[in-house]
Image (cartoon, rainbow, N blue to C red):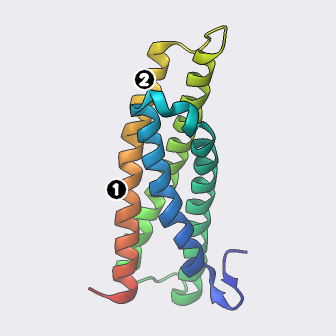
Amino acid sequence: MFDQVFGLPAHALIVHAAVIFAPLLAALSIAYAALPRLRHKLDWALVVTAVVALGAVFAAKESGEALEHRMFQGRPSPAIGVHSGFAETLVPMTALLTVASLLMVWLTRARRAPQGAGSRVGVLLVSAAAVILAVAVGYYVVRTGHTGATAVWGG
């Protein structure tokens, strides 16, 4: 499923979605945490982006593994090994950021509800975790992309 699309390596196509949506998720998570006055405008954008980013990063990793298996038969170059190592970290980091972002939206929306179910401390803790995870996702998406480009194009 993740190997080819119309005869082209799927990874070369899918990776672009991960490169767009993972940093967008990081930026929206930080904006949502840092700008409480804009939260009502960012709610659904953050929720949708979180789900799409996780799917894109997962699909990019799976398609990369399929490409690696087809091209190198289990013996990748050291540069591809470094790239794969960053991708192995990016996927769980993106999953954690997705969970933190969804929880942050849920808690802040619950706080705005008439019952006020979300606690202020809970919102602050989850927001802080989301910001830290967003920085980590930003770092790993850049490192993963850079090492992948370096592995393919040299440098």
Mark 2 nearby-residue class (10 Å; few <14, some 14–19, many ≥20): few
Which residue is at a point 40% across and 76% down the rendered structure image? 148
The total of numbered circles placed on residues is 2
Q: Position of residue 60 (x, y in %)?
A: 57, 68
Report the front residue among 48 and 87.
48
Circle 2: element type: helix
Judge from the rendering whether residue 3 lies leftward or rightward of residue 88; answer left or right: right
Q: Position of residue 34 (x, y in %)?
A: 39, 32
Q: Position of residue 149 (x, y in %)?
A: 38, 79
Q: Quadrant of the N terminus?
A: bottom right
Residue 70's image quarter?
bottom right
Q: Is residue 153 above or below residue 120?
A: below
Q: Is residue 138 above or below residue 3?
A: above
Mark 1 nearby-residue class (10 Å; few <14, some 14–19, many ≥20): some
Residue 3's image quarter?
bottom right
Circle 1: element type: helix
Q: Is residue 29 above or below residue 114?
A: below
What's the amino acid at mark 2?
Answer: Leu
* Residue ranking furthest to the top: 115
Label 2 belongs to which residue? 125
Label 1 belongs to which residue? 139
What's the amino acid at mark 1?
Answer: Tyr
Which residue is at a point 55% across and 39% down the rendered structure image? 42
Which residue is at a point 56% across and 67% down the rendered structure image? 17
